[in-house]
Image (spheres, rainbow, N blue to C red):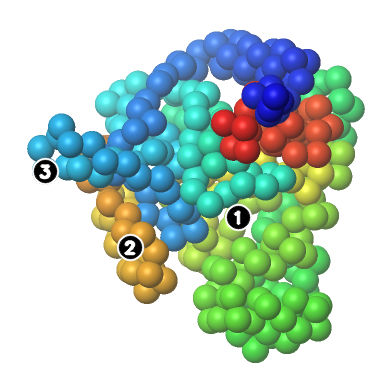
Amino acid sequence: MQTDWQPTCSLELLRLRARLFGQIREFFAGRGVLEVETPLLSQALGTDPQLAFFSTQYESLPNQSTLFLQTSPEFAMKRLLAAGSGSIYQICKAFRNGEAGRFHNPEFTLLEWYRVGFDLPQLMTEVDDLISLLFFDYGLQVTQRISYRDVFQQYTGLDPLVFSHHAYCAYALAQGIPEAVTICADDHALWLDFLFSHKVQPHLGKNALCMVYGYPSCQSSLARISPENKGIAERVELFIKGVELGNGYYELTDAVEQERRFNEEIGIRQQRKQPVAVKDERFLAALYSGLPDCSGMAIGLDRLLMLLSACESIGDTLSFSIHRA
C-alpha cells in the first residue's frame, strides 16, 4: 500500500498555521483594516519577466480563452483601493510556475495588505509591529533597517546604483561565481539579483527582522521612484535568518508611468522568448481613475511558518506539498 497519501506536515503544524492566521486577522481587525477576497483566476496578470505563470483555457468568455492563476492579488486589490475600499488585506493562495524547492512551492500562501495614506517608513513600522507580535515567544533581537546601497556595498564593495559591467564581472570571477557573467550579461537588474542573493542575503536578519529599503530604480517594479534620488525606488524587502519573507512598496499611482513599465517588461519577455504576458487593462483603468496614496506589503506565510517552526523546508509546513498534491 502506498503511504504518500498522508499530509506533508504534522498535525502540530496545521494547528500552528491556524493560530498564525488567527493572530494576523486579529492584528488587522484591531487596526480597522478590512479583510477582502479577490479572484485567483483572472483574464490578465503582471508582466514581470522574473515571474513565470500558470494559464488555463476557458471557452465561455467572449474573445477570451486563456485565463491565468494569479502570481499575486496585487492588481485586483488596487482596483478595490481605487474604488474606495480604504485599507485592506487578504490571506490567499498565489501561484508561480517552475518554483519548487526548499523555499518554493508552485502554490503558496500570501498575506498582502495596503494602507491608505501610509508612506514607506510608516509601512515598515507596521511590519515591525506585526512580526514582533508573531515572533513574540521566539526572542528576536531589535529590528534592523538598512539601505540597499549600504548593505550591498558592505558585502560586495560594489556600488549598486552605478553599473560597471567590467567591475561586476571582475568581482564575480574573484568570488568564484563565473556563471554570473554568462547569466547576467549586461543586464544591471539581473546582476543585482544574482549578487544580492548569493553574497548579501545570507548575512541578513540573524535572529532579527532585517528591512532593506531603497532599492535601485532598475528594480522598481510597482514602486515609486524617490523624488530625492531618481536612482532609488521606494521599495523594502524583509529578511529573517537569510530568508526573504516579504516585499513592499510605496505604491506607484502614475498610470502613464505604470503602462510604460508594463510595455518595457513585455519587450524584455519577448527578447528572452518567455511566454506572452497579457497587460491588465482593468488595473490600468483603475490607476487612471485614481489610486489613493498608499503603501503595500506581501509576506509569504509558508516561509514565515518555516521559521516559526524551525522546519528545513516550506514543504514541511504545507498540508500537501506539490509532491503529494
Mark 1–mark 2 Cα distance, whole angstroms, equals 25 Å
Measuring from the top left, give residue 268's x and y in whole percent: 38, 69
Q: Residue under label 1, please give it.
A: 214
Tell me whether circle 1 and circle 2 mark residues in contact (CB < 8 Å): no
Q: Nearer the viewer, residue 321 or 210?
A: 321
Kindly identify the amino acid type of the residue bearing the numbered disc 3. Asn
Residue 54 place in picture, x, y as percent: 41, 45
149 w.r.t. 83: above or below: below
The N terminus - image quarter: top right
In the image, taking residue 5 as reference, residue 32 lies left or right, namely left
Q: In this picture, is 285 found above or below 37?
A: below
Q: Which type of secondary structure does the marked residue at label 2 adopt?
A: helix
The residue that mark 2 highlights is 266
At label 1, the amino acid type is Gly
Q: Residue furthest front?
A: 1
| Helix, strand or loop for disc 1 | strand
**How far across and how far down the image is residue 119, in percent?**
52, 39
Instruction: Tell me if residue 185 can be seen.
Output: yes
Q: Quadrant of the C terminus?
A: top right
Do residues under tags 3 and 2 come within 8 Å of each other at their CB atoms?
no
**Residue 181 sits in which quadrant?**
bottom right
Q: Nearer the viewer, mark 1 or mark 2?
A: 2
Label 3 CA crowd tier, 10 Å (few <14, some 14–19, many 20+): few
- Which residue in the protein does label 3 denote? 63
